[in-house]
Every structure is written in structure tokens, then in C-alpha cells.
Image (cartoon, rainbow, N blue to C red):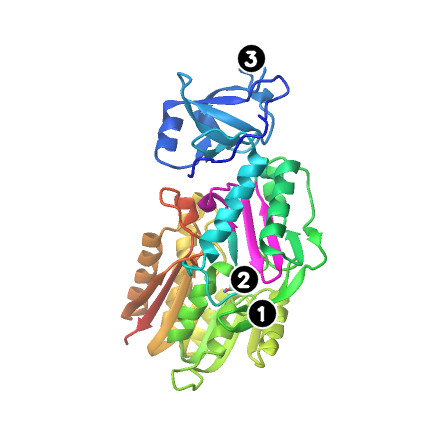
């Protein structure tokens, strides 16, 4: 993580005049040496909230803490949570005299990383992730840009403090001149962090909905509706990849607001003929499908949208002997925790098996997993198992992950969660 270069304005001492500090066990120190920013509460051996009495409860929630080894050697600076099992998240290997200034600097760096002129990390879109928490050295902050509306999520106590919030909103205004900044709230996370409940709302400006264009395709965006921060921006590059290979009759299972479906419906061959003859999107969420229909209309298309449980529909269609040339599977995260892994793998296997049975020779399967607990190897294994059971040979055309604006930070496996395989069916 970059060491802070912020010039101290004033030192953020605790009420008692001493900066809170925290001592780590050797195992906690090892984690930091492994360049992972999180240390669990079980690896905190003592805390000093400023009164120097070693009482854990005297470190204020969301405090900036000096991190020490057991002998008192300074290791860096972290953000403290009084409630999470992740007690600290490192923010700098040096001192942090002014957290809001550091947050502002890191936001500017995150924007530059994506949009620097010489560094075309983000192209063909006005919707992309600007700040991805740990991967941008801003643990607990997510910011997505949807054209002129920004959507942010605050996930930790430290990011929720008033001076840090002010710095976030001000920096985003200065750097990107949005028409509105929306805050999306995940009630469960605020509860876990023991933060007061809050509704999703317009934080600044007067605009919470807009229109975005990804890869030349237009989408409505409503910052106060929908799932995630409103769309699945991590799939943006995978939409474009799918549109290079997809053809014929297409089924987009778990289509949400039509990201893959629309890219496929509008995909053209080099000589400008439509690649796909028909596209059907399936999702269990009616509001998502209503938005998908509006998105199709925005692009001058009318597609078939089916409100159904995709598991049931795939089972039924496979049993009825239906066939497709292209199937997209992008289900929600089945494994929310390690405990769910076996069940999740079973779910992926079933979906992939049914899809493979329905694909014609030469067909394309675009299959995704967004469960962090399902590794790339697990996912590949389960898709291979499905192929065996379906008696099919498939080749990997592309093995992909999240779009580049959702960077993976080496040594922080939590930043790598999305798998997207594009496979070609041989027989
Ligand atoms: N491919 C989409 C994102 C899919 S997210 C995109 O790129 O935008 C997963 C979707 O699965 C959500 O829209 C959710 O409503 C839907 N979903 C969840 N369980 C489902 C089920 N059993 N059957 C069909 N859809 C389901």
C-alpha cells in the first residue's frame, strides 16, 4: 500500500491526547507481512485507546490506530472497528496524521488509475467502478460512476465518520463534477459495523437516475433502485467478450436488467449482420425484467423476457428437448460463506449440466460465478464435472474475471471473486 505523503495539518489525538494504538500477536504481524490489510480481533493482543490503560473499549469506533508489534515496534496505521471480527484494516505503512486528506488523495489516485490518458484501463463506457475498497487502498469504500451520477457505499466505521464522508463527497465533486451522488446502504453491513441504520438516499446534487452507455449499448440507471449499486459493472468487459462469440438462438439465464442479453441482441459480425437470431432473458425478479424491457426499447429492440426460477426453467426446457446456440449463466453468489461451498458447487453443476445438454454443437456457453468462496479452480472443476455428466466436450475460449476497473490486489484474495468462462461445445 502506498505510504502516505500527506503533509500533517494537525495530529488527530484522542481525547486523552495520546493516539490510540493496538498491539498485534506474531500471527497478526505475519498477516501484515503477507501484505494482507486485515487483522482479526483474535490477533489483537492489547489496545490502548489513549488513556493507556489497555482497555479495549477505550479505542473509539472507527478510530485511526497506530499498529505495533508486541515489543512496541511501529508497523503502520490502520482503521479500527469496534464491532467487526476484522478489528483493523491497514491504511498505510507510515503515519496518517490526517485521514480525510489521505482518503481524498487515494480517491484521486483511484480515478487516475482508471482514466489516465496513457493508460486506457476503462474504455467504451461512462459507467465503471472508481473505488474498489481494499484494491484501491480505501478499505470500506466503494464508488461507482454511472455517467453523471455517482453511487457510493460505505462499509466500515472509519469511512462513516463525518470528516471522512465530507472528504469523499467533496473530492468526488471536485474531480468528476457529477450531477448527483447517491449513497447505497446495505442494512446488514451497517448492523454488523454497529452503525445507525440509514436509508439509501441522494447525498448531494439533484440527480439520482440517468442513462449510461457501455460498449455502445444504452441502459437506464436508477441509483435508488435495483441490486448492488444498481448494475453489475464487473461484467462490462465480459458482455463485450460474449458478444464476440455468441450466435443463433440465445438464452440469458439470470439476466437481471439485460446486460448480456442486450449485448448479444445487438452483436454484429464484421460484415454487419446480426450474430443472434433470437434472445430470451430469464430472471426471477419482475422489477429487473421491467427495467430490462425498457433497456431493450432504449436500443430499439424487443426481446423476450421470462419471469421464472431459472433452475426450474432450465430443467423444464432441457427435459422438453429445447436447444440453443448460446447460453449465459450468471447466477447470484451461491456461496455467501465457506459453509455453503458444497451446496453452491452443486447448484453450479446443475445449471451448467442442463445448459450443456441444451447447447447445439458449435454452441457457446458463457458461465459465471461471483462467489468469492468458489475459487477459479473450484469453478473450473465443477464445469468440467458437468461436461462429463452431459457427455460433451467443451473447449475454453476465454477464461475471464471482473472488468479491469475492479482490480485484483495480489495477496488479497477477497478482491478476486468473479469467474467468467466462455466455452465452445464441440459435440
Ligand atoms: N447477468 C446480470 C447479473 C445477474 S445477477 C447482469 O450482468 O446484469 C443475478 C440475477 O439472478 C439477479 O437479477 C436475480 O434477480 C436473479 N435470480 C436470483 N435467483 C434466481 C432464480 N432462482 N431464478 C432466476 N433468477 C434468479
Quarter-of-image position of residue 166: top right
Q: Nearer the viewer, residue 67 or 313?
A: 67
Q: Position of residue 70 (x, y in %)?
A: 40, 18
Q: Is mark 3 within 8 Å of ligand 1?
A: no
Q: Residue at x 56, y 72 (%)?
A: 218
Residue range corresponding to the magenta coloring: 131-155
Q: Earlier in the sequence, mark 1 or mark 2?
A: 2
Q: Which is in the foreground here, disc 3 or disc 2?
A: 2
Label 1 sits on a secondary structure element that is: strand
What crowding class fits label 2: few (fewer than 14 Cα within 10 Å), some (14-19), or many (20 or more)? many
Q: Residue at x 71, y 55 (%)?
A: 205
Q: Nearer the viewer, residue 340 or 83?
A: 83
With respect to residue 237, does 136 lie above or below?
above
Q: Which is in the foreground here, disc 1 or disc 2?
A: 2
Label 3 sits on a secondary structure element that is: loop
Q: Circle 1 sits on which residue?
A: 219
Q: Earlier in the sequence, mark 3 or mark 2?
A: 3
- Residue 297 makes an appearance in the image: yes
What crowding class fits label 3: few (fewer than 14 Cα within 10 Å), some (14-19), or many (20 or more)? few
With respect to residue 260, does 419 lie above or below?
above
Q: Position of residue 245 (x, y in %)?
A: 37, 75
Q: Position of residue 401 (x, y in %)?
A: 39, 58
Q: Circle 2 sits on which residue?
A: 127
Q: Is residue 423 magenta?
A: no
Asked whether the beta carbons under mark 1 and mark 2 sit within 8 Å of each other, the answer is yes
Image quarter (top left, top right, bottom left or bottom right) of the C terminus: bottom left
Q: Circle 3 sits on which residue?
A: 53
Image quarter (top left, top right, bottom left or bottom right) of the N terminus: top left
Q: Position of residue 422 (x, y in %)?
A: 36, 67
Q: Residue at x 59, y 21 (%)?
A: 57
Q: Earlier in the sequence, mark 1 or mark 3?
A: 3
Q: Nearer the viewer, residue 48 or 259?
A: 48
Amino acid at each position: 500500500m502506498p505510504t502516505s505523503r500527506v503533509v500533517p495539518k494537525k495530529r488527530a489525538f484522542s481525547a486523552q491526547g495520546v493516539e490510540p494504538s493496538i498491539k498485534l500477536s506474531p500471527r497478526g504481524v505475519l498477516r501484515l507481512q503477507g501484505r494482507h490489510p486485515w487483522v482479526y480481533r483474535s490477533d489483537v493482543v492489547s489496545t490502548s485507546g489513549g488513556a493507556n490503560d489497555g482497555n479495549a473499549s477505550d479505542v473509539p469506533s472507527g478510530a485511526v490506530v497506530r499498529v505495533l508489534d508486541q515489543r512496541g515496534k511501529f508497523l503502520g496505521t490502520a482503521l479500527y472497528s469496534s464491532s467487526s471480527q476484522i478489528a483493523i484494516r491497514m491504511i498505510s505503512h507510515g503515519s496518517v496524521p490526517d485521514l480525510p486528506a489521505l482518503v481524498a488523495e487515494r480517491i484521486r489516485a483511484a480515478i487516475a488509475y482508471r482514466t489516465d490518458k496513457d493508460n486506457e484501463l476503462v474504455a467504451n463506457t461512462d459507467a465503471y467502478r472508481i473505488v474498489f475498497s481494499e484494491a484501491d487502498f480505501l478499505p470500506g469504500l466503494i464508488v461507482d460512476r454511472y455517467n453523471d451520477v455517482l453511487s457510493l457505499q460505505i462499509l466500515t466505521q472509519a469511512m462513516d465518520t463525518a470528516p471522512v464522508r465530507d472528504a469523499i463527497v467533496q473530492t468526488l465533486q471536485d474531480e468528476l463534477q457529477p450531477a448527483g451522488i447517491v449513497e447505497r446502504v446495505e442494512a446488514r453491513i451497517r448492523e454488523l459495523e454497529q452503525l445507525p441504520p440509514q436509508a439509501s438516499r441522494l447525498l448531494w446534487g439533484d440527480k439520482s437516475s440517468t442513462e449510461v452507455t457501455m460498449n455502445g449499448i444504452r441502459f437506464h440507471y436508477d441509483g435508488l433502485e435495483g441490486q448492488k449499486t444498481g448494475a453489475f459493472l464487473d461484467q462490462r468487459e465480459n458482455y463485450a467478450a460474449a458478444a464476440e462469440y455468441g450466435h443463433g438462438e440465445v438464452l440469458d439465464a439470470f439476466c437481471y436488467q439485460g446486460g448480456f442479453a442486450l449485448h448479444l441482441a445487438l452483436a454484429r459480425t464484421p460484415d454487419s449482420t446480426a450474430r443472434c437470431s433470437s434472445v430470451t432473458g430469464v430472471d426471477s425478479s419482475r422489477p429487473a425484467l421491467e427495467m430490462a424491457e425498457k433497456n431493450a426499447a432504449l436500443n430499439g429492440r424487443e426481446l423476450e423476457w421470462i419471469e421464472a426460477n431459472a433452475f426450474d426453467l432450465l430443467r423444464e426446457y432441457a427435459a422438453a428437448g429445447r436447444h440453443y446456440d448460446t447460453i449465459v449463466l450468471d447466477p447470484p453468489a451461491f456461496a455467501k460463506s465457506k459453509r455453503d461451498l458444497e451446496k453452491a458447487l452443486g447448484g453450479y453443476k446443475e445449471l451448467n449440466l442442463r445448459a450443456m445438454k441444451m447447447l447445439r454443437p458449435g454452441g457457446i456457453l458463457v458461465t459465471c460465478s461471483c462467489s468469492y468462496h468458489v475459487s477459479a479452480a473450484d469453478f473450473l472443476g465443477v464445469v468440467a464435472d458437468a461436461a462429463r455428466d452431459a457427455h460433451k466436450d467443451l473447449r475454453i475460449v476465454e477464461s475471464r474475471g471482473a472488468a479491469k476497473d475492479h482490480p485484483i490486489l495480489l495477496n488479497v484474495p477477497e478482491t478476486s471473486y468473479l469467474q467468467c468462462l466462455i466455452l465452445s461445445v464441440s459435440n
